[in-house]
Amino acid sequence: MLSKTEAKKLYDSGFKRPKIYDDVYPQDIYDYKNETWIVGGKVFPRGEFGAPKEVYTQGTWIPLEEDLISWMEEHDCTFIISFDGMTYKIEAADVNGTSYKAKGVSLELCLYKVIIQILHSFNGNMPEKEYELMEVDLIEKEDLQ
């Protein structure tokens, strides 16, 4: 897991959850008042978070491995990850084809390092994808049984 300091460095460099995603998820981890919280709660049929609201509104979100990979995917980065038994290595390229390399003792740390490089090369201003919602299917309560 990344530290609060590493998470803040990501945010200061321009990292943010892509707009297409919800702001908070039950699996999210937050640092709040020097305590580590997982939001938790009921996911389906109507989500209710388990942590107090101030945890995820006032705390610092600590992105997980899945969040970092999703960020890379959402920004059209290509990447190859390898592990040699001790160290993770990543070779990545941004949407413009610029190459980056990083290594770390954990996959999250490796992804963190390469994302920082990518953000710095874009001066923190990553292009946002535009999405158009074409169709929505509503799920009725009786369909869930």
Image: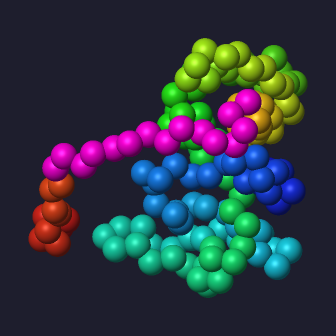
Q: Is residue 112 visible?
A: yes
Q: How is the image coloured?
A: rainbow
Q: Is residue 57 magenta?
A: no
Above/below status of 66 relative to 94: below
Provide residue 26's location: percent of width, then percent of height. 53, 66
Above/below status of 77 relative to 46: above
Report which quarter residue 131 is drawn in: top left
Picture residue at 31% right of the left edge, 70% below the top: 45
Picture residue at 77% right of the left edge, 53% below the top: 12
Quadrant where the C terminus is found in the figure: bottom left
Instruction: Give left or right: position of 98 versus 102.
Output: left
Provide residue 135's location: percent of width, then percent of height. 16, 50
Above/below status of 127 relative to 142: above
Q: Main secondary structure of the magenta part?
A: loop
Above/below status of 107 relative to 24: above
Report which quarter residue 72 is drawn in: top right
Nearer-the-camera pick, 144 or 46: 46
Provide residue 25's location: percent of width, then percent of height. 52, 63
Report which quarter residue 56 is drawn in: bottom right
Instruction: Give left or right: position of 7 versus 127.
Output: right
Picture residue at 57% right of the left edge, 52% below the top: 17
Instruction: Give left or right: position of 9 versus 82.
Output: right
Q: Is residue 64 visible?
A: no
Picture residue at 77% right of the left edge, 75% below the top: 32
Report the number of numbered marks: 0
Q: Is residue 132 magenta?
A: yes
**What's drawn in magenta, residue-wise?**
121-135
Nearer-the-camera pick, 108 or 9: 9
